[in-house]
Image (cartoon, helix red, strand yellow):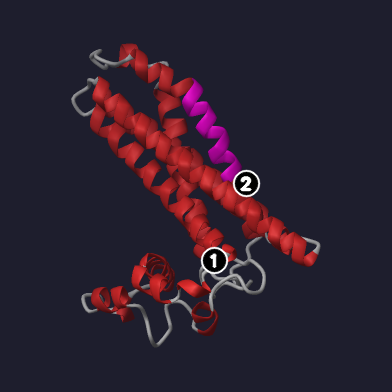
Amino acid sequence: MYVAEGTGFEPVKGLLPRVFKTRVIGRYTNPPFVFNIISDKIDSNKLAGLTKNLYSSMIYLMDLNWLLVNFKEVNLNTILVIAHVIGVALGVGGASLSDLLFFKSIKDKVISKDEFESLMTASKIIWAGLIVLILSGLTIFLLIYLERGSIPMLASPKWQAKLSWVGIIFANGIFFKTMIFPKIKKLIGQKLSLENTQSVLWYFAFSGFISIFSWYSVTIISLLPRSFRPPYFLLMGVYALILVLGIVISRFILKKKIG
């Protein structure tokens, strides 16, 4: 089940339909119609390799015309990979939406009931994406194990880092639901100030930045080429460093907006 080079997914033989296995995403000669329309407005020579792979991959998955024409070649394995990508997309979108909504809600220093409900909706989108991501990933691992008797991908530092970040997202989601939401709910209708938010600013900065940064980390590492093989502890070290800096900066921004 080999997936086209550059997508970051490495299942076993037969995973995708023939059109994926005969052309490399981002460098094929007969792209779907959506790519033709959009590429007229973009100078592909100026696109970085990573951006081009992400752009082309998402266009491939979203091209309903291709899916209908090649529907007979779509099998369970293909659906699992598409579901995996959709899970990541929901997670990234939900995390981005959640942060935007939160900063918008504190702009006037008052969190309304409607704004709180919007944050709840964004949280549900994140959880939906995480569940789809985990279930599709576990099923892909199961299929690989049934075919090979082992899961070679687990020896890859990239996959180890990705699984670690998914675990962090899951733990942070529970923390956000049990600790952050109740604190936000208590602030509904109140005039936000440093006095009534001082004890929770670190919570907001900590959980909010972990969520969005971890989701984007999962997305980026899934799109990196197979030739990119840094050690696991280097990946986690860079991740931890950016995480600490991001949390401190987020806390500073929140304090400035509320103060």
Mark number displayed over residue 164: 2
What percent of the width, then of the height, locates residue 15?
60, 70
Q: Secondary structure at mark 2?
A: helix
Q: Are marks 1 and 2 in contact (CB under 8 Å)?
A: no
Vertical side of 228 occupied by 116: above or below: above
Q: Tell me if 259 is positioned left or right of 183 in this view.
A: left
In the displayed structure image, the side of residue 141 where residue 105 appears, left or right? left
**Disc 1/disc 2 C-alpha distance (Å):** 25 Å
Q: Secondary structure at mark 1?
A: helix
Quarter of the figure that contains the C terminus = top left
Judge from the rendering whether residue 95 lies leftward or rightward of residue 3; answer left or right.
Answer: left
In front: mark 1 or mark 2?
1
The image's mark for residue 108 is none
**Residue 95: where, in percent of width, then height?**
40, 42
- Identify which residue is drawn at 64% across, 71% down: 1
- Whether 86 is among the magenta residues is no
Residue 46 shows in the view: yes
Magenta highlight range = 166-178
Q: Which residue carries the number 1 mark? A: 78
Residue kind at label 1, given as amino acid type: Thr
Q: Residue at x 31, y 25 (%)?
A: 116
Q: Between 42 and 246, which is closer to the camera in this rendering?
A: 42
Measured as percent of width and height from the top left, residue 197 is found at 35, 17
- For label 1, the crowd category at 10 Å Cα-Cα, with few meaning under 14, some 14 to 19 and many 20 or more, is some
